[in-house]
Image: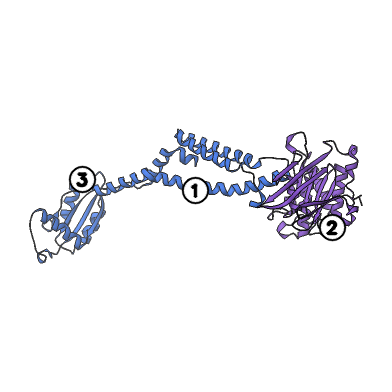
Amino acid sequence: MVFSIGQKAFLEEQFLKLIPENKAGSYFYALIASTESYQNISRQMAVLPGVHKVDVLSEAQIKDEVKGILGSLQINLNQTSMDLNYAGLKIIYAKDLKPRAQELVRDYLTHLAGEGNITLGAIKLNDQTLDKRNQFINVIKSWGYSLYLFIVCIFWMISLLSIRAKIAEASYLLESYQRKRKVGVKMASFGLSLIFVLSSATTFILGMPQLLNLSLAFMIFVVGIILHSKKYQWENH
Amino acid sequence: MLNQSGSLNKKKNKGPPGPIGPVFYCEDVSVEFNEIRALKNIQLTIERGEIIFVTGASGAGKTTLLKLLSGLQEPTSGKIIRPNYYSGKKNLYISNVFQDLRLMGKYTCEENLMFAYDSSIYKDKAEFMQDMNELTKILGIKDRLHLKINQANGGLQQKIAIVRSLLTRPDILIADEPTSSLDTENAKRLFDVFNLYNAKRGLTVVWATHNKELCKSFTGRIIHLDNGRLVYSGHACFI
């Protein structure tokens, strides 16, 4: 808990490392005027260096794309004239692929499908995926840490309460049958102080912790010790 | 068989070093629970080295009186002076045997007794073990110390609770019906142990009991309570 509170920046950094990096780069659409060979083309494109992924578009997706293009050209076509025999592919480049390499991929695709059988769309930036990742990172930064801290504190409280029962039991017996006083608070002080010192040391080893947060952790430990200061009664056993 | 008379109260010079005189002094003490008066205007003095039986019917206020003497209960009104072990001057240690025994069920009898090992009163563990062996032998439970409390019968549990209290080497032992699960013979044997500690160490014993057989053979002081009132405090032979 001390570590979690004291090393917020370190933990965030470690967690963000775990989020898979966006390997997809920009993309373009291709319409192939024959549905017979598109699967073979798709396979060959997928293994091509510089290509991250090849998606085969469904008929509905193709129609939407075509409508969008035609709409932008202010051309109106009726439904029947759109029932063409073509297949659509979405070629996603690997991230940071150079423009020259991107052109080579497009040329290779044209070569595979045949120049007269293919229409290539413009290369578009993959902003959406990038946005999603950034959004996720922002969510993590804004309340992910708080949630993590909340869970850690809950576990801490549960373990503290389970230990409290044992300490209280031992404390009662030692105070009742030995000439000792305030056994519970002494045991708690020793144990919790030891844990605090060790965990603080670990936190410092990993870098300078946030001292304000560390003081908060210290306060939680003090509360833990105060919880044991109450004299235990056997009736609570 | 030892003399069952609480004899040390008359032989103060032979008693162990320490404060001599009253260990408990109650003046007009009353205890109320939810407007029910459990003890009414108790006037009582207990001298060091006495062995006292507290008798009375159930609900007469015996347990409340013992809790009051132990410091586990404060009076609602009146004044009580108790020895305070930690005050430094009246360094008397009180040990209790409770009616509910307060043993750890998941531990063995021996482990429960080990809770009484206090390095500040025993030279070493061997001395403690010697005391433990002696007491458990007298009470005939030495061969049953390996049993878990949950597996032990009521009599054994009661003996363990008493031995644990005696192992604390108390100056005052307050026992709430410690022989309720014991037959007369065992109860007498236990009383012999108390007498032995009274003679050896000047142990003051305040013992609440229902055991009529034991009371009959007792020649010390008996305190009789009735409905929260102390109706008799005097020599057993006059009751």
Q: Is residue A133 above or below residue A54?
A: above
* Residue type marked 2: Asn
In the rendered image, residue A81, in percent from the top left (x then y), is placed at: 9, 65
**Residue B14: x percent and y percent?**
90, 38
The residue at which mark 1 appears reads as A154
Using the image as rendered, state which of residue A76 and residue A211 is in the foreground.
A211
Viewer-nearest of labels 2 and 1?
Answer: 2
Disc 2 versus disc 1: distance between alpha carbons? Answer: 52 Å
Residue at x 14%, y 64% (from the top left corner): A85
Chain at tag 2: B
Is residue A162 placed above or below A207 in the rendered structure?
Answer: below
Give the left or right position of residue B174, taking residue B104 as reference.
Answer: right
Q: Chain of mark 1?
A: A
Closest to the observer, B25 or A143: B25
- Label 3 and label 2: CA atoms lie apart by 100 Å
User: Mark 3 falls on what kind of element?
Assistant: helix
Residue at the disc numbered 3: A101
Name the chain under label 3.
A
Marks 3 and 1, the one that precedes in the sequence? 3
Q: Tell me if A1 is positioned left or right of A95 in this view.
A: right
Chain painted in purple in the figure: B
10 Å neighbourhood of mark 2: few (<14), some, or many (≥20)? some
Amino acid bearing label 3? Ala
Q: Which residue is mark 2?
A: B186
